[in-house]
Image (tube, rainbow, N blue to C red):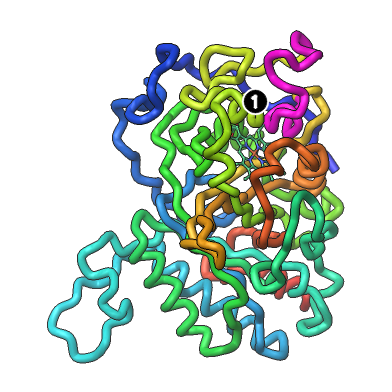
Amino acid sequence: MKVSRRRFLGGAGAAVGTLAAGAVLAGCDDQSTADSAPKPTPAQPFYGTHQMGIIAPTAEYATAIALDVTASDRDGLVGVLTSISANIEALTQHDPPEPEELLAVPEDAGIVVGVPGKLTSGTLSAGASLFDDRFGLAKLKPAALVPMPDGLARDELDPARTHGDLLLVLQAPNRDTVTNAVRRILRDLTGAATARWMLDVFARPDTTEAPDVTSTRNLMGFKDGTANPDPTLDDLMNDVVWSAGAEDGEPEWCAGGTYLAARTLRMIVEDWDAQTLDHQEKVFGRTKVTGAPLDGKVESDVPVYPKDTAGQKIPLTAHIRLANPRDGEALLMLRRSMSYERGIDANGQLDQGLFFVSYQRTMQAFLEAQARLKGEPLEQFVITHGGGFYFSFPGPAKGEYLGAALIDAAG
Ligand code: HEM
């Protein structure tokens, strides 16, 4: 295992302008991004060492859909994987044909006529249950892949919104395109796999170029993604995100894949909105408007905890301090979270929150961070209702399907 324990990178990014004290949040986003138009998420290839949709910035809209395979044998599973793969390849790499005179219902049911019809990405991952005795894959299970345990934080896991044999994440710049893709993929599975849970999510895309800054905000109104490791650094991504397969003590087929932790985290927004700005900022350890750490001035400033051992500037229980104590020990992860909104619950309270997604080379990176966060003040405002642990397949070789490396290894 060669994963190095290293400090989070940070502080090297371009300096960003400081906002005037007392600036009103609305219309006052960080100055580095104020003039930049949303940049389109770059086209991502389907074939390659790694799957699309993992290190790329998130698109505006996505759907996460967990599937249970109902086919009873390995051939049936291969049918599921090839069907999903063919659709992801078609939907991400090719524009839908312009409809002319229709003779039959078109492939896209007419939903994406007039909108950019291409998916930005489609990413497929396997849950622990795929490696039970149904398909003869037990010996090939990624070493640390288990069903997500209950009780990692303030959890009220709903089995109907948790786990699944497969997790598919489909992203696009508009809602219709995602909806069309979900329908087409489910239709073509012809019952060989059925939806177990599904979550529609969205994000304000990051318009910044530099690392250590972001324009994305979560539904608590804080910048989210600031301290992510820089996904443009290949060596860093090899260190933090991508499995090295046998070298990591994993089955060989895992090389190029990654562990995915997904948590549907409901925010108790009514309570959150009743808090003072001072309290909200202390919960995270960052300034709401600029995203700067409470001991710094601009978003890209790196918090210096050894100079604040009593937590007078950044409380010892602040989210960022627990998530990454920057002590040279904390393992890195790449977060790719998005927001969700599900209307109201039975009590008329808003049901919205964060679909937390992190990718990491080892589950240890996620589990250690989650353990440090247990009992943090943020927990008063967040309940976990679903999600799961998965392993994202390596990218398919030319002409292959997603998961082919696993199936081939099974012989
Ligand atoms: C609703 C739940 C959560 C919210 C609203 C939230 C929000 C935030 C915010 C606003 C930041 C600071 C900006 C940034 O660097 O992105 C942050 C940082 C971070 N969060 Fe979370 N987070 C949540 C859950 C989690 C969970 C479950 C984990 C992992 C187990 C996690 C891991 C991290 C890490 C590693 C950082 C970077 C800390 C640093 O390097 O300074 N977060 N989060």
From the image, tell me which residue sits under label 1.
Answer: 282
Q: Would residue 46 be visible to someone looking at this image?
A: no
Q: How many numbered discs, if any?
A: 1
From the viewer's side, name the closer residue of 411 and 369. 369
Q: In the image, what residue occupies the spot 41% across and 62% down? A: 92
- Taking 345 as reference, is 365 above or below it? above
Task: Give me the residue at 52% from left, 34% from top.
Answer: 222
Q: SS class of the residue under badge 1?
A: helix
Q: Position of residue 4 (x, y in %)?
A: 80, 33
Quadrant placement of the N terminus: top right
* Residue 187 picture location, percent across and down: 46, 84
Q: Residue furthest top?
A: 307
Amino acid beneath label 1: Lys
**Residue 205 location, quadrant:** top left
Q: Position of residue 185 (x, y in %)?
A: 47, 77
Out of 276 and 60, give the one closest to the viewer: 276
For the stretch drawn in magenta, the main secondary structure is: loop
Where residue 246 sits: x, y (%)?
Answer: 82, 54
> What residue range appears in magenta?
306-325
Quadrant for ligand 1 reads top right
Residue located 73% across and 34% down the image: 323
Q: Residue at x 34, y 62 (%)?
A: 118
Horizontal relation, residue 61 to residue 73: left or right: left
